[in-house]
Amino acid sequence: MEKLIVSKFGGTSMGDAAAMRRSAEICKKQNSRMVVVSATSGTTNKLIELSKTAEQGDWNGCEKLIYDLRERHFTIGKELEIPEYTRTKIADLLAETETLARGIHLMRECSPRAFDRMQSFGERLSSLLFTEALTQAWPTRTVKNLDVRTVLATDAIYGKATPLTEKTAENAQRLLSNLRTENTCYVTQGFIGMDPQGHTTTLGRGGSDYSASLLGEAVSADVVEIWTDVDGIATTDPRLHKGARAIRDITFTEAAEMAVFGAKILHPTTLTPAMRRDIPVFVGSSFEPEKAGTWIRREVKDAPIFRAVALKKEQALVTLSTPKMLNTHGFLSRVFSVFEHHRVSVDAITTSEISIAMTVDRPMLTHEALFKDLRELGEVTIEEGFSLVSLIGNSMNHKPGLAVKIFGAIEDINVRMICLGASKHNFCVLVQEAQGPEVVSRLHQALIEC
Ligand code: ADP
Ligand code: ASP
Ligand code: MG
């Protein structure tokens, strides 16, 4: 039986008509059954800016942004020679974007629900354009645009909705049960979903990767492909360090650690659905599809101690101290239930007899309700301006002499916190933000290029 392939294309792969054509050729070559697309590069940022500009009451600024969005999408449409009815659909979506911006402007308020709806226009516009690009590239297939909100069900936490996997599988079963056999390729939107009341939600920035994996799970895909602007996953972000090398095969666990600890190539939760169903994930370049790319699987042949280095910027260190922690039990559980209640994740933690230090993403510092609850448990101190640098690999907790090697490479750098031991796949250090890239380069040189 033919493989059922779900392919996802990121913003740069949707960036202009030429990129869309290249991506369409890949879908045809791969025989993709479902294609998940991001907004054209930069569009989500523009929609976010539009919401903020409208909320601030600057209508001239809004008009300029709406003009840019129109120009961008109509230019691609023109170059792709899209038919009149698609042009009308695009015009309608842009008109709706403007109406929503007017509403926000009038109220001087952008609710989380309105904000998600605003961000959804990017993927809805790009998917209409890409449906046409693919129709032209693949005349023997029926190409249909699918509103992903009819399939991808989520809760109503706007901005970072949690997918409802059972409901999503049910929807897929109802709407896409013939996906393997019918002569159709569905083009759909990444990043967005629908809550139980029928409102549009988003999965968080970069969420289209996650959408592809969730949809792959829902339709029982054989492979999920992530097509982007680099040739697969590298040993570190190639933009940060020239010595980065392509990784050909990597385990789910290692790649998931990389994603959670800042490797932007994958949204942090991308691999969770694929892992649940054991669906291999391929990451490749839509600009150079002939290159080898990276395969992510449950098991791979080699298990190096150091596979990669990841950088997570904009970290804050929250320290909670209280003598109540002395010889008591249940304290940590109370601390973490506060984080769970406010849906804020902690990346690295260390504890001492009377204090616990945790890193959180800096934007979380504005979460007043979280800090109010934490202050009820003890004295809270906040330090900002850090980056978390993580080494990802295997058997790290069983290797003698490891710390000497790592600290030898960064002996003159002030390390504010370290985390080793919790995972055999991860060792991380918290350093001043300005030194983050230097620490990445040094660790990469000393431990991966050696
Ligand atoms: P897309 O729009 O296709 O989703 P992203 O910009 O979100 O693309 O992700 C691709 C980028 O991720 C690359 O251009 C690269 O700079 C960055 N990146 C971060 N870490 C890595 C890594 N370890 N390997 C490859 N790319 C990485
Ligand atoms: N368009 C969204 C973003 O820019 C989702 C994505 O590209 O994955 O965050
Ligand atoms: Mg991305």
Image (cartoon, rainbow, N blue to C red):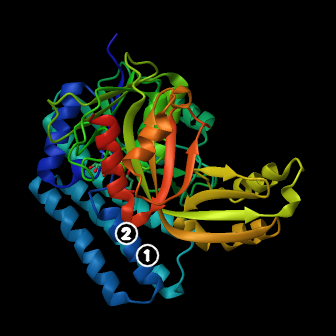
Helix, strand or loop for disc 1:
helix
Tell me the quadrant of the picture where the C terminus can be found.
Answer: top left
Q: Position of residue 182 (x, y in %)?
A: 34, 22
Q: Is mark 1 within 8 Å of ligand 2?
A: no
Amino acid, disc 2: Leu
Tell me the quadrant of the picture where the N terminus can be found.
Answer: top left
> Is residue 217 at least partly visible in the picture?
no
Q: Is residue 234 left or right of residue 167?
A: left
| Residue corresponding to mark 1 | 51
> Is residue 289 at least partly visible in the picture?
yes
Helix, strand or loop for disc 2:
helix
- Within-10-Å neighbours for mark 2: few <14, some 14–19, many 20+: many
Q: CA distance from mark 1 to mark 2?
A: 6 Å
Query: Depth check: 271 or 197 in front?
Result: 271
x 17%, y 57%: residue? 77
When the figure is inspected, residue 414 is found, relative to residue 380, above or below; the finding is above
When the figure is inspected, residue 80 is found, relative to residue 273, above or below; the finding is below
Query: Depth check: 97 or 174 in front?
Result: 97
Contact between marks 1 and 2 (CB within 8 A): the answer is: yes
| Residue corresponding to mark 2 | 47
Q: Position of residue 84 (x, y in %)?
A: 18, 56
Q: Position of residue 152 (x, y in %)?
A: 51, 43
Amino acid, disc 1: Ser
x 34%, y 59%: residue? 122
Where residue 379 sits, quadrant-wise, is bottom right
Where residue 51 sits, quadrant-wise, is bottom left
